[in-house]
């Protein structure tokens, strides 16, 4: 086998094996006109990321890489006051109870808008994600997948729900809107006790208000059909206070009946076809095909086919 053929053969095998087994990149962007302190909580069994909480000033961004099979949540804390020397303090909304900038394994105290993710465990495995208002709402949030394949829809709550919050759910300073469960501690609102099933726990008048304002977000515990989204091999951008363009896109793109988001196509083939090595690969193969045996060419073709299909 010619050396250049062997190199291409090995490279494609490694590319096929590694694609989809490298987790996902999350990029958090703050488009609010105020500072947000994102919090991050990995679920039990998932490794922690580089940070569990940090300051994100207006216009700022920060990215994190997660391993395969990672699950956890992101949210934004507002109205925070931390001592510059000790880093100790607290936040008005979304506080995680750590008394520090880092949440250190603490979750968001409700009410808080949550972005929840479960990343696929390997090549071809789906990611599951949603934006949840089950624990209430504190600021607008949009989740945008990129580079993935399948039903990869944008989701989130881009409206200012604080301005439309019913009085009985409103936090005193109007900085957040509580869920009916938190406000009334009733099993019928919390989907607990006798109401702990989809058959017995139905949307309440309060969850319907949330749903009408933010139709793609979880409004109560069993709101799966129009609120859970899937994508394969994607990276994700989480935007606090998304721009007008993003707001229009999310508002004008209702999810399909299956609740899996709007179809965006594979997203992978144009990326690969337009990449620099792709034409060079076929140019080299055609000009030197006499040195590459037909079985090798067939193997490369098959590998490339599966890469495009399942990446």
Image (cartoon, helix red, strand yellow):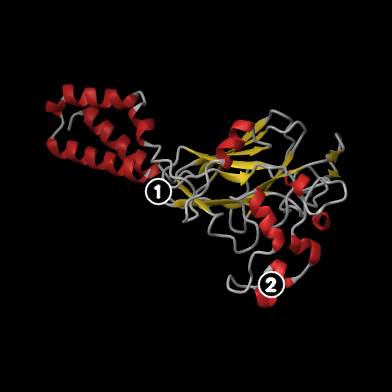
Viewer-nearest residue: 209 or 46: 209
Secondary structure of residue under mark 1:
loop
In the shown orientation, is residue 189 left or right of residue 7?
right
Going from N to C along the chain, the mark reached first, 2 or 1, is 1
Please name the residue shown 36% across and 38% down the image: 15
Please name the residue shown 64% across and 54% down the image: 211
Would you call the spot at circle 2 few (<14 residues within 10 Å), some (14-19), or many (20 or more)? some
Please name the residue shown 66% across and 58% down the image: 208
Would you call the spot at circle 1 few (<14 residues within 10 Å), some (14-19), or many (20 or more)? many
Residue extending furthest toward the bottom: 194
| Position in image of residue 235 (x %, y %) | 51, 40
| Position in image of residue 131 (x %, y %) | 62, 50
Secondary structure of residue under mark 2:
loop
Q: CA distance from mark 2 to mark 1?
A: 37 Å
Residue that carries the numbered disc 1 in the rendered image: 123
Query: Dividing the picture into quarters, in which one does residue 198 lie?
Result: bottom right
Query: Dividing the picture into quarters, in which one does residue 287 lie?
Result: top left
Camera-nearest label, 2 or 1: 2
Viewer-nearest residue: 295 or 265: 265
| Position in image of residue 250 (x %, y %) | 57, 41
Above or below, 192 against 234 in this view is: below
Whether label 2 touches label 1, CB < 8 Å: no
* Residue 41 visible (yes or no): no
The count of marks equals: 2
Above or below, 286 against 147 in this view is: above
Above or below, 60 against 42 in this view is: above
Please name the residue shown 17% across and 33% down the image: 1
Residue that carries the numbered disc 2 in the rendered image: 192
């Amino acid at each position: 086998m010619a050396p250049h053929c062997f190199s291409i053969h090995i490279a494609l095998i490694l590319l096929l094996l590694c694609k989809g087994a490298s987790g996902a990149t999350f990029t958090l962007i703050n488009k609010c006109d105020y500072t947000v302190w994102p919090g991050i909580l990995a679920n039990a069994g998932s490794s922690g990321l580089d940070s569990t909480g940090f300051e994100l000033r207006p216009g700022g961004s920060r990215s994190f890489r997660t391993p395969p099979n990672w699950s956890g949540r992101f949210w934004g804390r507002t109205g925070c006051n931390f001592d510059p020397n000790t880093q100790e303090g607290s936040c008005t909304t979304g506080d995680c109870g750590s008394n520090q900038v880092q949440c250190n394994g603490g979750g968001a105290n409700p009410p808080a808008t949550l972005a929840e993710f479960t990343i696929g465990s390997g090549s071809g495995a789906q990611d599951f994600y949603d934006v949840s208002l089950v624990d209430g709402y504190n600021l607008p949030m949009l989740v945008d997948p990129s580079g993935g394949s399948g039903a990869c829809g944008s989701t989130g709550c881009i409206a200012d729900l604080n301005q439309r919050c019913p009085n009985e759910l409103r936090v005193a300073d109007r900085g957040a809107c509580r869920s009916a469960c938190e406000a009334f501690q009733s099993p019928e609102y919390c989907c607990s006790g006798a109401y702990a099933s989809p058959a017995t726990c139905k949307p309440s008048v309060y969850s319907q208000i949330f749903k009408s304002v933010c139709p793609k977000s979880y409004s109560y515990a069993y709101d799966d059909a129009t609120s859970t989204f899937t994508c394969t091999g994607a990276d994700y951008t989480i935007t606090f206070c998304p721009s007008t363009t993003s707001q229009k896109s999310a508002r004008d793109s209702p999810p399909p009946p299956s609740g899996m988001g709007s179809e965006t196509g594979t997203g992978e083939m144009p990326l690969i076809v337009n990449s620099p090595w792709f034409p060079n690969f076929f140019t080299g193969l055609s000009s030197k095909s006499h040195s590459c045996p037909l079985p090798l060419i067939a193997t490369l073709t098959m590998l490339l086919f599966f890469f495009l299909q399942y990446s």
